[in-house]
Image (cartoon, rainbow, N blue to C red):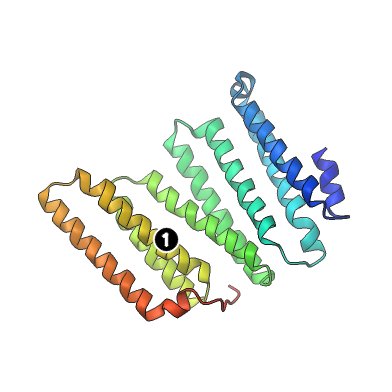
Amino acid sequence: INSGILFLSFKRYWILLSYWSFFITWIMLFTTIFSPAGMRSPNMQAFFCILFFILFTINCLGFKLFRKLAIASSDTLVVICNSVFLYFALLLLFGINSLDFTAGVTIIFAIVYLTGGLITGRYLPQQRFLVDALFAVSMIAFTTFFAVWYSGFSVTIIWVILAILSFLVGTLFKKKIFRICAILVFAATLVKLLLVDSSNFGAVEKVVAYLFTGTILLVVSFLYQKFKERIFSDSESSV
């Protein structure tokens, strides 16, 4: 059925039919994953998840790319949901009790979507929604990977470095999505530092943590005041 819908999608953009098949198929896949039969054959379940992920990606983007039309925000949302569903399906099948597998899948998603964003931005710069979505998923995946692979205060330090690098990349290449992601990662770092890290610190460590927090706040405040117009500017360039 989905193969037929994929064929039809290149003839006419049946948006309701595509969305209906998308959500129904993923619901069926997750139902199968949680069934005893699904648990006994994870490789087969993973094959179908990857197959339908590819079909739905082509189904969602193929018609408009083939006709050289702009990818709408609704189509981009489906692409993101498709990626999230595949990610959690793979974790449920193989990595629910394995941090190594979770970290491996996460970093693969991060690299693939970063590469996809670069390629799309280079050859399809007019598809801004899609490019921003790919970069955003990549940043979320990188942030998650460091949280899974490392622990404690190391995650906080790495997140700060990631936020700084993201802000610099967004400023140098005039990519708003990276600048916004940098602000969000800074915010997540502060929340983690105050609510998670500080609860495990002694008196001296808390003083260092609060000094570190103040430094982050000063850096964020300085960057915002100096570049606030550029941070949220709509002027973009291809990567």
* Residue lying at 64% horizontally and 28% vertically, measured from the top left: 31
Quarter occupied by residue 125: bottom right
Q: Is residue 103 above or below residue 132?
A: above
- Kindly tell me whether residue 55 is visible in this rendering: no
Tell which residue pokes out farthest to the top in this image: 36
Could you say where residue 120 lies in the image, as x and y percent from the top left?
65, 65
Quarter occupied by residue 68: bottom right
Quarter occupied by residue 35: top right
- Image-based side of 220 in relation to 29, left or right: left
* Residue lying at 46% horizontally and 66% vertically, measured from the top left: 180
Q: Is residue 3 above or below residue 161?
A: above
Q: Which residue is mark 1?
A: 184
Q: Quadrant of the image for the C terminus?
A: bottom right
- Say what amino acid the circle numbered 1 marks: Leu
Tell which residue pokes out farthest to the right in this image: 11
Could you say where residue 90 lies in the image, as x and y percent from the top left?
57, 37
